[in-house]
Image (cartoon, rainbow, N blue to C red):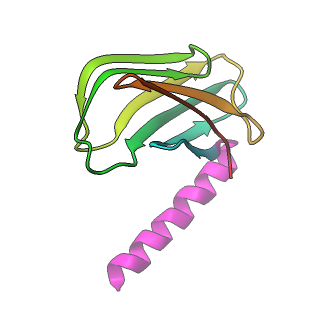
């Protein structure tokens, strides 16, 4: 019980500090038939840092071949001949002195894998 209280208090403190600094924290989510994606982003008026995470929804598939991930129409591209799916596929985003995403931003995602192509959008809930 003490650990839960400590975690909650830590989160309240971190949130209060972040709100005072002008930073915004946004989570974008989306999914297709076989993939689920998420972006957790910290941003201010001129910079942003975050992590994209993608997970295959079909737990029976453990390996994907010819994998291509295209985020935001080429803003981030990941190509792999073969990936093992024991955890999520992650890639970072960092930008300073740039236009940042906001709560209304829609981020297009195209995933090509095993001869299939799936598209979906990441949006803030």
Between 21 and 99, the residue placed more toward the observer is: 99
Identify the residue at horizontal 51%, vertical 35% (top origin): 50
Prevailing secondary structure of the magenta residues: helix
Task: Answer left or right for 83 relative to 6.
Answer: left
Q: Which residues are magenta?
A: 1-24
- Residue 67 image offset from top left, x and y in percent: 35, 22
Identify the residue at horizontal 73%, vertical 29% (top origin): 45
- Judged from this view, the residue extending furthest toward the bottom is 1
In magenta segment, residue 124: no
Instruction: Specify the quadrant of the image occupied by residue 64.
Output: top left
Rendered position, 15 above or below 52: below
Between 107 and 48, the residue placed more toward the observer is: 107
Q: How many marks?
A: 0
In magenta segment, residue 19: yes
Rendered position, 11 above or below 40: below
Rendered position, 28 above or below 75: below
Task: Answer left or right for 105 relative to 87.
Answer: right
State the quadrant of the N terminus: bottom left
Identify the residue at horizontal 26%, vertical 49% (top origin): 60
Between 82 and 114, the residue placed more toward the observer is: 114
- Residue 23 image offset from top left, x and y in percent: 65, 42
- Residue 53 image offset from top left, x and y in percent: 43, 39
Between 92 and 18, the residue placed more toward the observer is: 92
- Judged from this view, the residue extending furthest toward the right is 104
- Residue 33 image offset from top left, x and y in percent: 51, 44
- Judged from this view, the residue extending furthest toward the front is 115
Instruction: Specify the quadrant of the image occupied by residue 121.
Output: top right
Identify the residue at horizontal 58%, vertical 39% (top origin): 42
Task: Answer left or right for 114 relative to 112.
Answer: left
């Amino acid at each position: 019980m003490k650990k839960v209280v400590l975690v909650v208090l830590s989160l309240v403190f971190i949130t209060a500090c972040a709100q005072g600094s002008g930073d915004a924290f946004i989570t974008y989510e989306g999914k297709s038939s076989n993939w689920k994606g998420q972006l957790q982003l910290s941003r201010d008026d001129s910079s942003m840092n975050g992590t994209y995470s993608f997970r295959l929804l079909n737990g029976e598939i453990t390996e994907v071949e010819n994998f291509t991930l295209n985020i935001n129409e080429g803003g981030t591209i990941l190509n792999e001949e073969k990936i093992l799916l024991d955890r999520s596929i992650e890639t970072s985003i960092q930008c300073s002195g740039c236009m940042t995403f906001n709560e209304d931003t829609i981020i297009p995602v195209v995933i090509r894998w095993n001869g299939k192509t799936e598209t979906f959008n990441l949006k803030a809930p």
